Image: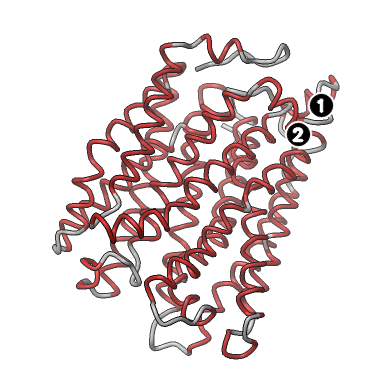
Amino acid sequence: MNKRAVFSSFIGNTLEFYDFALYGALAGLFTKLFFPHSDPVSTLFMNGVGVFSIGLIARPLGGLIFGYIGDRYSRRLALSLSMYLMAIPSFIIMVVPTYATIGILAPVLLVSARILQGFCTGGEYNGAAIFALEHQEPEKKGIVSGMMTASSASGLLLATLVSFIFTNNALPEWAWRIPFLFGMLIALFGYYIRRKNLESPEFQKALQQKTFTNAPILEAFAHYKFQMFITALIAGQTAVLAYMMFTLITPTSILPELHQFNRNSIYILSIVGLISFAGVCVVSGHLSDKLKTKKIYIMISASVLSIILIAPIFKLLLSGSFYSALCGQVLFGCLTGLHAGPQHIYMQELFPNTSRYSAVSFSFSLGTGLLGGLTPQITSLLIKTMGNPALWVITTSFVLFVCLLWIQTNNSLITNTRGKDAEPSKI
């Protein structure tokens, strides 16, 4: 295992997701400071968490731009640039005055910073995974895939811990700005780490043989439409599970049953869920190394389990018992990790290295933006009409299950849509 590539990608992803997720962890606070309205529930999901969704929707553009740089010029350059630029929105959020001070300009600046965060994350997450996996021998790529997904959970966990510390009533009202100072500094630190990396061997080979393309995303659309569609579905399902778990289990949750728990208990639920998510990512990634070409069965199983277990999970979460809710969060985290662990290695094997960065980053970001971006609003609607949002998870899980099962029973569908210079599909 190339530990240096794994370490730099893991740290970079963790720091980038910390910056990106910190807004989500403080969405309730931003609602009060930047979006004053009389109805706190509608404000939270139309403004505070709505801006969280805007960050997700901005990701496909980042996937396109950084994907082009990564496929045409340098993986290392694209990742270093995305990390460096991530410091800018952290600085803006740290210093922007509230609505009470500058009026409508405050939310405008906040939304602008959020868009730039999403843009940078669109170029970072999948690019870091591609960079790390292209440095590894085949028998270690699965566990590295799991570690890359675990890095995003680690970023969410770090953001949760920091928000818990700096939203304490004992601290000054402006203390929430300090975590964004940390975010700016660690983004610059991540940029420094990235500059020390060597280019991935696979990409060096493409440069030496001059097999790269001048328009990688057009090549992807020309030869790999179905693979891009599957990548978007896998990403969307991960986003639905992860962001639902992340945005619902908060002190400002719109789940009324959680209001009986104190602030410390809510944070414990969130932290335990994210730890179980990260841990199972690594386990399921390692399992994909053992299953080799049958790794698709892990995600098929995760889809089936999501359909079966999500309603009981929410029953535990909404039971009123802290220990039942804790069990529900552990199950939620495990379910998300089982699905997400092998996703990077599976998706990357669908594309040749000449268009891999562009195809995966754009498709993944599009799926995350559409399904993940809609999750807060759909969740809110389902809670108001049905009492819990399990139906949204069941729907997305069923669609993914049907598509993955179709792929497995019609393997030639992928093979026939590959371009002439593509690497062998390993589905």
Please name the colour scheme applied to the rendered image: secondary structure
Q: Is residue 57 above or below residue 134?
A: below
Percent position (x, y) of residue 330?
27, 50
Q: Is residue 277 above or below residue 52?
A: above
Horizontally, residue 197 falls left or right of residue 292, namely: right
Task: Tell me the amino acid under the disc marked 2.
Answer: Asp
Residue at the image point whose x is 36% and y is 40% from the top:
280
In-front residue for pair 137/80: 80
Residue at the image point whose x is 51% and y is 22% from the top:
139
Horizontally, residue 36 falls left or right of residue 13, namely: left
Residue at the image point whose x is 30% and y is 52% from the top:
389
Write down the residue under mark 1. 213
Percent position (x, y) of residue 46?
47, 67
Percent position (x, y) of residue 188?
70, 62
Residues at discs 2 and 1 in contact (Cβ within 8 Å)? yes
Horizontally, residue 8 falls left or right of residue 72, namely: left
Crowd rating for badge 2 (residues with CA inside 10 Å; few <14, some 14–19, many 20+): many
How far apart in space, not on screen, are marks 2 and 1 (Cα)?
Answer: 8 Å
Res 396 → quadrant: top left
Tell me the number on the disc at residue 71: 2
Percent position (x, y) of residue 93?
62, 74
